[in-house]
Image (cartoon, grey):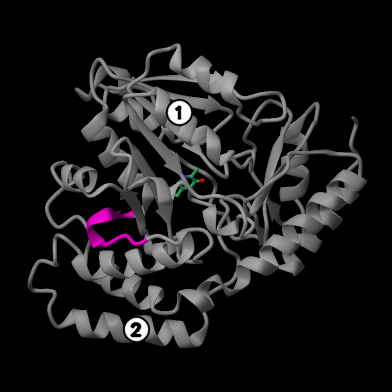
């Protein structure tokens, strides 16, 4: 054991570490498989050149221009009328969540999530000395009023809802957020990292933020926007909540380069999101194929599919990896998660999975 005087509850813990392997099909962290077009690359390079001459100065610590662009995108997507005062960006929505927990969590506070759900939620809690508990989803991974009531019975301070949920892909019924907000005095965080993959008629909770000071919706440019390497996520909330979040942000947390590149990306949001429909079709195709092959498939509104059920999922994971296909061992025992790749990558995955001698 280390003799470093680190925090007792952190001794022996391992950092987050999904494998980053250079294989033919990287289908393990829900990235968008399509690289940016030369036109967008050029726009980003120009933006960096502009800002590079000013890097001797700190960036706009309030990121007003970027927040204004994000508000425009959100308004178009959610049919709202929000301003930059409703938006707070950081280095990935993971950092936004950390800030949310620094502000609303802390010693003596309890956060509740709905299992199975995102593996980082317990880590935000650990880091901020917030207690974390889960309530189980229904067998089909959905949430209904009785599941929400189960969470409320724990008397939490924060309730975390991911929609679509990771790793299951499950979409949350809109009316449940309204139901919850009507009964709960703490903070409701709706994690919409995959919202752009939902069907157009599916709800987002963003229209509820202006009238509900207890609701925060988080979004990211890491998934549908094809900008995981940029590290840009944001919170959408009532202006009062956004102002409060700024208390805990580190000074100048978002670099001038990040702000400039994100703005350039948002100016091309239509093109960036142009592959979303193809990814949705590929997802539906892959889900049907998996079902036809006799696997159990969780209905997904995101760019990944949870499927199973294997007696030895590690063996399946390794069998695929041996053929250059990297997926993820996550979710309940016996399930695996595959991200939707390019049509070629998905074909590789199908071939590799078909070739395995499955014992179950
Ligand atoms: C990928 C993901 C995020 C986004 O993380 P970033 O830090 O923005 O890259 C947030 N929530 C869930 C559930 C995710 O799967």
* Res. 122 visible in picture: no
Quarter of the view holding residue 286: bottom right
| Front residue of this view, candidates 37 and 233 | 233
Q: Residues within 10 Å of mark 1 (few under 14, many from 20)?
A: some
Q: Residue at x 50, y 50 (%)?
A: 204
Residue 181 appears in the picture as rendered: yes
Q: Secondary structure at mark 1?
A: helix
Q: Residue 206 versus residue 94: which sits nearer the camera?
A: 206
**Percent of width and height locating residue 280:** 69, 61
Side of 328 relative to 258 (left or right): right
Callout 2 touching callout 1 (CB < 8 Å): no
Q: Which residue is mark 2?
A: 45
Residue shown at the point (55%, 58%) measured from the top left: 31
Quadrant for the C terminus, please.
top right
**Picture quadrant of residue 258:** bottom left
Indicate whether 336 appears above or below 45.
above
Q: Quadrant of residue 317?
A: top right
Image: 230 above or below 44: above
- Which residue, given by chain and number where applicable, does mark 1 sit on? 180
| Residue 287 screen position, x and y as percent | 79, 50
Where residue 168 sits in the image (x, y, percent)? 64, 38
Q: Which residues are magenta?
A: 81-91
Mark 2 or mark 1: which comes first in sequence? Answer: 2
Please state the total of marks drawn on the protein image.
2
Spatial CA distance of label 2 from label 1 is 44 Å
């Amino acid at each position: 054991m280390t003799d470093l005087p680190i925090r007792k509850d952190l001794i022996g813990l391992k950092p987050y570490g999904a494998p980053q392997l250079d294989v033919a099909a990287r289908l393990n962290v829900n990235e968008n498989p399509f690289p940016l077009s030369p036109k967008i690359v050029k726009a980003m390079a120009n933006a960096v050149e502009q800002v590079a001459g000013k890097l001797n100065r700190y960036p706009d610590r309030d990121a007003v221009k970027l927040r204004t662009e994000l508000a425009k995108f959100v308004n178009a997507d959610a049919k709202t009328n929000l301003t930059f005062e409703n938006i707070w960006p950081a280095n990935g929505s993971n950092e936004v969540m950390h800030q949310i927990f620094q502000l609303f969590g802390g010693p003596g506070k309890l956060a509740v999530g709905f299992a199975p759900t995102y593996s980082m939620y317990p880590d935000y809690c650990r880091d901020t000395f917030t207690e974390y508990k889960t309530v189980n989803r229904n067998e089909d991974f959905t949430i209904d009023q009785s599941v929400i009531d189960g969470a409320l019975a724990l008397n939490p301070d924060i309730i975390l809802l991911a929609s679509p949920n990771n790793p299951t892909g499950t979409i949350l019924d809109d009316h449940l957020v309204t139901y919850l907000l009507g009964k709960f005095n703490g903070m409701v965080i709706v994690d919409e990292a995959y919202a752009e993959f939902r069907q157009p008629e599916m709800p987002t909770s963003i229209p509820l933020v202006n009238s509900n000071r207890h609701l925060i919706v988080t979004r990211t440019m890491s998934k549908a926007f094809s900008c995981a390497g940029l590290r840009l996520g944001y919170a959408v909330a009532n202006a009062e909540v956004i102002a409060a979040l700024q208390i805990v942000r580190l000074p100048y947390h978002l670099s001038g380069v990040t702000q400039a590149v994100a703005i350039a990306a948002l100016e091309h949001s239509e093109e960036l999101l142009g592959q979303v429909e193809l990814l949705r079709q590929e997802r539906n195709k892959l889900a049907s194929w998996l079902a036809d092959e006799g696997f159990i498939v969780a209905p997904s509104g995101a760019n990944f599919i949870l499927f199973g059920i294997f007696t030895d999922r590690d063996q399946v994971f390794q069998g695929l990896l041996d053929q250059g296909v990297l997926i993820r061992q996550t979710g309940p025992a016996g399930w695996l998660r595959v991200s939707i790749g390019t049509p070629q990558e998905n074909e590789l995955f199908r071939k590799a999975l078909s070739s395995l001698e499955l014992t179950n």
